Image: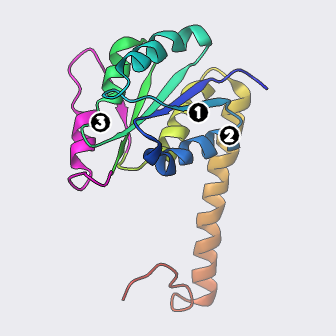
């Protein structure tokens, strides 16, 4: 098994249902990962150790998901020179997710965190793969095949609607 290139961390195990989407897409794209729980508030020393040791373990990108106050992505970014992608997670005590979004998005100058949509772990995984794919031809090829498959799905949908009419293709439509 190859060494992990992307570290996926989250503030608590309850975030795993969201963060699993990053793990799934990265595995599909052939990117080796590691996944663990690192809480900025409940295990701050673990967070520091994780962030400071990641580059030395050949991690290339860290994806950090957190809900509520969502300090994990920013705190990790302050401790490493690796790119950090923040995933705001809508937690049960959240204010419609805005608390998480703004906590991750509004970073001070000098401590950037790439931020994806609320519960957007899949896009975080794709973004991490794109960062790695910029320097790894095999990952870049896998990404191109994935994006080509998205194009084919849209073209297949368009063809179905054009051939069968829109009334027979109302999956996901609301009245």
Which residue is rendered at x = 66% and y = 48% of the image? 146
| Element carrying mark 1 | helix
> What whole-number distance in Å separates the C-alpha atoms at marks 1 and 2?
10 Å
Q: How many labels sit on residues?
A: 3
First reached walking from the N terminus: tag 1 or tag 3: 3
In the rendered image, the vertical position of residue 159 relative to residue 62, given as above or below:
below
The nearer-to-camera label among 1 and 2 is 2
Left/right placement of residue 135 relative to residue 71 reads: right
Q: Is 146 in front, or is 29?
A: 29
Q: Which numbered disc covers residue 129?
A: 1
Residue 74, given in percent of the width and then of the height, sits at 31, 25
Question: Which quadrant of the structure image shows residue 31?
Answer: top right
Question: In which quadrant is the C terminus drawn?
Answer: bottom left
Left/right placement of residue 42 relative to residue 160 reads: left
Q: Which numbered disc covers residue 27?
A: 2
Q: Is residue 105 magenta?
A: yes
């Amino acid at each position: 098994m190859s060494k992990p290139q992307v570290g996926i961390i989250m503030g608590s195990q309850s975030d795993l249902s969201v963060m699993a989407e990053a793990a799934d897409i990265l595995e599909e794209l052939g990117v080796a990962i590691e996944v663990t729980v690192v809480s900025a508030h409940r295990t701050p020393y673990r967070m520091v150790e994780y962030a400071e040791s990641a580059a030395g373990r050949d991690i290339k990108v860290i994806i950090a998901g957190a809900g509520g106050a969502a300090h994990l992505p920013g705190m990790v970014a302050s401790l490493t020179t690796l790119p950090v992608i923040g995933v705001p997670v809508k937690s049960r005590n959240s204010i419609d997710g805005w608390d998480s979004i703004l906590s991750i998005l509004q970073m001070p100058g000098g401590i950037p965190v790439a931020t994806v949509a609320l519960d957007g772990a899949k896009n975080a995984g794709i973004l991490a793969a794109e960062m790695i794919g910029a320097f790894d031809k095999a990952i870049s090829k896998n990404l191109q095949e994935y994006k080509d498959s998205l194009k084919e799905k849209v073209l297949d949908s368009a063809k179905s609607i054009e051939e069968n009419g829109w009334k027979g293709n109302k999956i996901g439509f609301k009245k």
